[in-house]
Image (spheres, grey):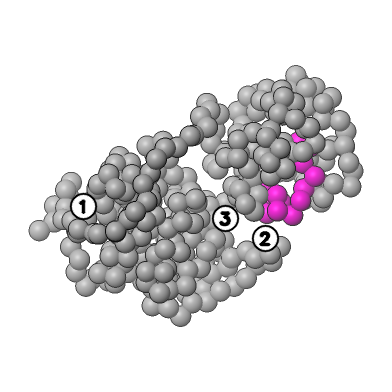
Amino acid sequence: MLSIGKRLFSTSSTRLNTLVFVESSKSKVSPASLSSITAALQLGKPVSALVAGPEGEIIANDVSKINGITKVIVAKGDQYNHYLPEELSPLVKDILTNNNFTHFVTAASAVGKSLLPRVGALLDVQPISDIVKVESEHTFVRPIYAGNALSTVKSNDKLILTSVRSSAFAPIEISDATNPIEEFSGNISSNNRTEFVSESILSSERPELGSASKVVAGGRGLKNKETFDQLLEPLAIKLNAAVGASRAAVDNGFCDNSLQIGQTGKIIAPDLYIAVGISGAIQHLAGMKDSKTIVAINKDPESPIFNVADIGLVGDVNEIIPELTEKL
């Protein structure tokens, strides 16, 4: 029997179509997961959401309020805390195979990038990663060559595994819908030998980089950490913007690597992106070129960043940024 509130998740043969793995961020539904739900709904099939661990229990009610979600599956247990992929992948495999899902969707986040290939290996299925468009339930578009080209991929697999680039899909809104919540009751043995030890998270009162509508980013042109902080922090505070950085700035110790934007960092698409002292290497452009308005400030007029900028200002950032901050 199933009842709203606490349900025993039945492993029946009913075809439930699309399963989306939903992450939490600071006890709220991750913005990247909200974007992945948008992509999943474009498949045109009923969508079920999977949340896991103590954080999953916290966000289950919010997920159940999203229009288009037919039900929320809650996998309780401390083993799913911190989203260790070695624990999650056997869980996802069991749910997918025992319920005849046709699609599995996750955000192309750090968690998704660790989870998806492991699920693919367990199921012997080739995942389609980092999609930016859903053409049909079998056909997707994904970037290649650092985003300089788009590839249309069609899969003939009975089960399709995909990860979603969050900057390509608008986050779905949490409404007042009331969809059922069910508890997964299976006993999954992962034989996991990986143990979570600790984490060090950079905390800030400013918006989170991955979901901020305004971003101020610094590059090698800022020379050192002191200049990076002195110029960007006041500007970010005035704009209520997140702070980001190029890989060169991160590698030189200007800021924490969690702020890196680019092919090997975060891929974002804010309404406003201000690039300060960033030359615009192809790997960096791959992470921010979809921003709505790009402002580039650099002393070198030949910098590639100006090729994608909507507004370009050539000059010394040490003079321009303090003046801009003061006028704001």
Q: Is residue 80 visible?
A: yes
Give me the residue at 80% from left, 45% from top. Answer: 279
Q: Secondary structure at mark 3?
A: helix
For disc 3, the marked residue is: 168
Q: Secondary structure at mark 1?
A: strand
Q: Which residues are magenta?
A: 272-289
Instruction: Please tell me how crowded label 2 is: few (under 14), some (14-19), or many (20+) other residues with Cα within 10 Å.
Output: some
Q: Is residue 68 visible?
A: no
**Mark closer to the chain start, 1 or 2:** 2
For disc 2, the marked residue is: 147
Instruction: Please tell me how crowded label 1 is: few (under 14), some (14-19), or many (20+) other residues with Cα within 10 Å.
Output: many
Q: Is residue 17 left or right of residue 280?
A: left
Mark pair 1, 2: CA separation: 40 Å
Name the image quarter holding the C terminus.
top right
Name the image quarter holding the N terminus.
bottom left
Identify the amino acid type marked 1: Glu
In front of the other: 82 or 275: 82
